[in-house]
Image (tube, rainbow, N blue to C red):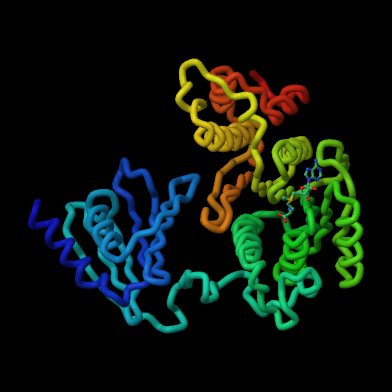
């Protein structure tokens, strides 16, 4: 056995040198928590993305830690490993009987996989720098040359990632005019970029609505849409909770709609049977003000733990309720925590059939922590929950 482990470690040692920049670990051994791990080297550090069925977890390692991590998981948790260097893609594979097989093939420069790079170099975004989206120049996100304004870089990164996640799903939408609503659109950077993405990149016909409470901001957004001939995009002043739409809504979006505004956005989407929902919640205060538990008082004793646990619990309950209402739902860490702590996206795709066992889970957590979450109340009052 030691001999086998030594052989694997030597194989990794041989190919995982200073010029390695990407690694994909796959083919998990049964019982492994992750189904795949992707590692990209940027600015001297390895950035790991660990994929479970529903989530992605992020981690950083230096070269030495990364190498010992590979040695640890290869054979123990995974059976395949692909490592890219400047010249080669190396393959390390274990047969059913644990026999090591290695191979390599020369990388054609134009076939090299996308490299995820750090702050100072450009990543292969769907909307790379230089893309001229004129309203965004007016709004001060891009310069006239299409460069991202330094202070707007984090926002640009968030929006690009948002669009990447949307892009992964929208290929499953029917080939017809799409109706999209952005709840709590604010200054509408995301709304304008999404409109550009759908109409210019996907060449789709869309009607897009942005809704926000702020009349002055909405007026400005409507002027900008008109100025640039974005005919399928308009903005309305209104409260998400009171918003009425009789139409056939395909996609509901919300980015950082505060506290329970997200619940109203999700409730509207569910009641319209929207096909897809992309929602990044923030300021989840509601549960933090309600939570108490006799059994799990250690989760509510320390302010910071209580706050973070409440925020995560809020979103877990929301996701479970979406499942109850017939949505396949995931929580995705959509940008790294250092860019924004409000970094979890709820992505939900309508499947039709609800999951009643998820209802039992929600009910028990609500009882345990004495909660009255808004989305639960709205769905209950609307008759969407069968208990
Ligand atoms: C943090 S900002 C996010 C703006 C934009 N989505 C973005 O990410 O840049 C939250 C926005 O949600 C709006 N908002 C909060 N509650 C709302 C409600 N009940 N109805 C409509 N808009 C709401 C606020 O006015 C604000 O513009």
- Indicate the quadrant containing the C terminus: top left, top right, bottom left or bottom right: top right
- Where is residue 100 drawn, in percent x and y? 18, 61
Left or right: residue 54 compared with residue 70: right
153 vs 203, left or right, is: left
Left or right: 107, with 130 as reference point: left
The image quadrant of residue 365 is: top right
* Residue nearer the viewer, 297 or 127: 297
Residue 231 visible in the snapshot? yes
In the image, residue 205 sits, relative to residue 367, either above or below, namely below
Is 220 rendered above or below residue 341?
below
Task: Give the number of callouts.
Answer: 0
Residue 299 placement (x, y as % from top left) = 48, 27
Displayed quadrant of residue 232: bottom right
Closest to the observer, 265 or 150:
150
Q: At 65% from the left edge and 35% from the top edge, which residue is drawn?
A: 285
Which residue is at 61% across, 63% downward?
Answer: 154
Q: Residue at x 74, y 48 (%)?
A: 252
Quadrant assignment, res 106: bottom left
Can see residue 167? no
Between residues 176 and 289, which one lies in front from this camera angle? 289
**Image coordinates for residue 386, horizontal then vertical, percent:** 66, 21
Task: Give percent across and percent down for residue 314.
Answer: 60, 34
Work out which residue is located at the far top of the displayed protein and give it: 294
């Amino acid at each position: 056995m030691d001999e086998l482990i030594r052989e694997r470690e030597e194989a990794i040692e041989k190919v995982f040198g200073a010029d390695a920049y990407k690694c994909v670990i796959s083919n998990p051994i049964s019982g492994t928590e992750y189904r795949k791990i992707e590692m990209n080297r940027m600015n001297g550090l390895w950035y790991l993305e660990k994929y479970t069925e529903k989530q992605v977890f992020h981690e950083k390692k230096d070269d030495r830690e990364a190498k010992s991590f590979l040695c640890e998981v290869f054979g123990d948790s995974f059976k395949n490993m692909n490592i890219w260097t400047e010249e080669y893609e190396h393959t390390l594979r274990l047969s059913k009987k644990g026999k090591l097989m290695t191979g390599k093939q020369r990388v054609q420069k134009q076939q090299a996989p996308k490299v995820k790079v750090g702050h100072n170099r450009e990543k292969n975004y769907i909307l790379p720098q230089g893309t001229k989206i004129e309203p965004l120049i007016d709004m001060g996100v891009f310069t006239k040359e299409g460069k991202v304004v330094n202070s707007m870089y984090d926002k640009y990164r968030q929006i690009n990632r948002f669009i990447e996640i949307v892009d992964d799903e929208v290929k499953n939408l029917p080939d017809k005019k799409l109706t999209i609503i952005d709840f709590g659109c604010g200054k509408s950077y995301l709304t304008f970029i999404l409109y550009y993405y759908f109409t210019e990149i996907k060449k789709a016909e869309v009607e897009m609505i942005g809704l926000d409470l702020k009349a002055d901001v909405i007026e400005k957004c409507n002027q900008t849409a008109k100025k640039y001939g974005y005919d399928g995009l308009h903005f309305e002043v209104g409260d998400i909770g009171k918003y009425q739409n009789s139409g056939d809504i395909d996609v509901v979006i919300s980015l950082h709609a505060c506290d329970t505004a997200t619940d109203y956005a999700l409730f509207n989407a569910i009641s319209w049977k929207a096909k897809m929902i992309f929602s990044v919640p923030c300021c989840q205060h509601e549960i933090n003000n309600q939570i108490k538990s006799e059994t799990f008082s250690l989760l509510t004793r320390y302010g910071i733990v209580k706050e973070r646990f409440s925020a995560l619990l809020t979103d877990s309950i929301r996701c479970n309720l979406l499942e109850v209402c017939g949505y396949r739902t995931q929580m995705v860490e959509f940008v790294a925590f250092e860019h924004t702590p409000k970094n979890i996206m709820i992505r939900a795709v309508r499947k039709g059939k609800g999951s009643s066992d998820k209802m039992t889970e929600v009910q028990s957590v609500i009882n345990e922590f004495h909660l009255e979450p808004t989305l639960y109340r709205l769905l209950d009052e609307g008759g969407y929950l069968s208990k």
